[in-house]
Amino acid sequence: MVINFKNPWHISIIACFLPLFFLIIDILLGNLGANPIQTLHIRLGDWSLRFLCVTLAITPIQVITKWRGMADYRQLFGVCCFGYSLIHVLVYLAVDNALNWSIIAVDMIESPYIWLGIFSFLIITVLAITSPNYAKKKLGKNWKKLHRLIYFSAVFAVIHYLWQLKGNLVQPIFYGILIFLLLLFRVLNYLKNKKLNKLMIPNRSISEQ
C-alpha cells in the first residue's frame, strides 16, 4: 500500500504507530529512566487509555458534526487500544515477571487492581475480535449491545490506573473526568432522542377524531 500523506486515513494509521515507534527508540537509547519497566508499563497503559478515550469520543464528534464517515476511525482506534493493551499485558507477564506464574498468581491475590485491568482487557479483546464487518453482520442487533461493554472497560481501566498509584493522581483523575463527560454526552443524547421520538408519536385521541 502506497502511503498518501494527504489521505486522512493513512495519516491516522501512521499516528497510531508513532507512540510505539518513539517508545522503541527510547528503549534502544536507554531513555526510560531509573525504573525502565515501570516507565514501560505506564506509557503503554497511558496510550491504551488514550486510544480508549479517542474511541469513545468518535460518537460525540459524529453527532455534533453529522459526519457519518467516523465509524471506520472508531474501529481503527479501538483496535489500536487493544494493541497497546496487549503489549501492556505482555510486558507485565514476560518482562516484569518472566512468565513466572507463581509470582503472577501471588501478585494478583495481593493487588486487586490487577483484576480490574484484566476485566478491562478481556472486554477490549472481545470487542477487537468482533470489530470486523463480518462479525457485525453475524451478530446483527446483538453487535451494538456487545460493543456497549466498552463503557465498562473504560471505567475498569480508570479505576485500575487510579488504584495502583500511590503518588500523583492527576492523570487518572483527568482520564476519569474525560470518560465521565463522554458517557454523560451519550446519556443526554439518548434522553434527547427519546424525547424527540415521543413528540413525533401522534396522540391517539387526536388521530381518532
Image (spheres, helix red, strand yellow):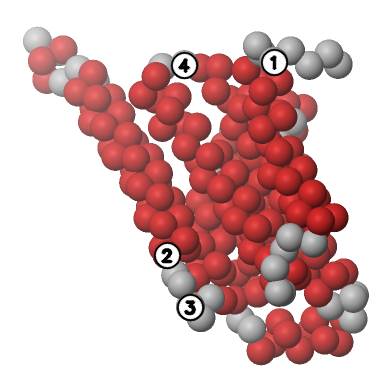
How far apart marks 4 and 1 lie (CA) works out to: 21 Å
In the rendered image of this protein, does residue 179 appear above or below residue 42? Answer: above
In the rendered image of this protein, does residue 120 appear above or below residue 164? Answer: above
Q: Residue furthest right?
A: 99
Amino acid at the residue labelled 4: Trp
Q: Position of 177 compared to 86: left or right?
A: left
- Specify which label sits upstream in the sequence, 3 or 4: 4
How far apart marks 4 and 2 lie (CA) works out to: 33 Å
Q: Callout 3: 10 Å neighbours few (<14), some, many (20+)?
A: few
How far apart marks 2 and 3 lie (CA) works out to: 9 Å
Q: Which residue is mark 1?
A: 5
Q: Position of 125 compared to 165: left or right?
A: right
Looking at the image, which residue is at 59% across and 32% down?
Answer: 74
Depth order, front residue of 160/95: 95
Looking at the image, which residue is at 67% across and 23% down?
Answer: 11
The label shown at residue 67 is: 4
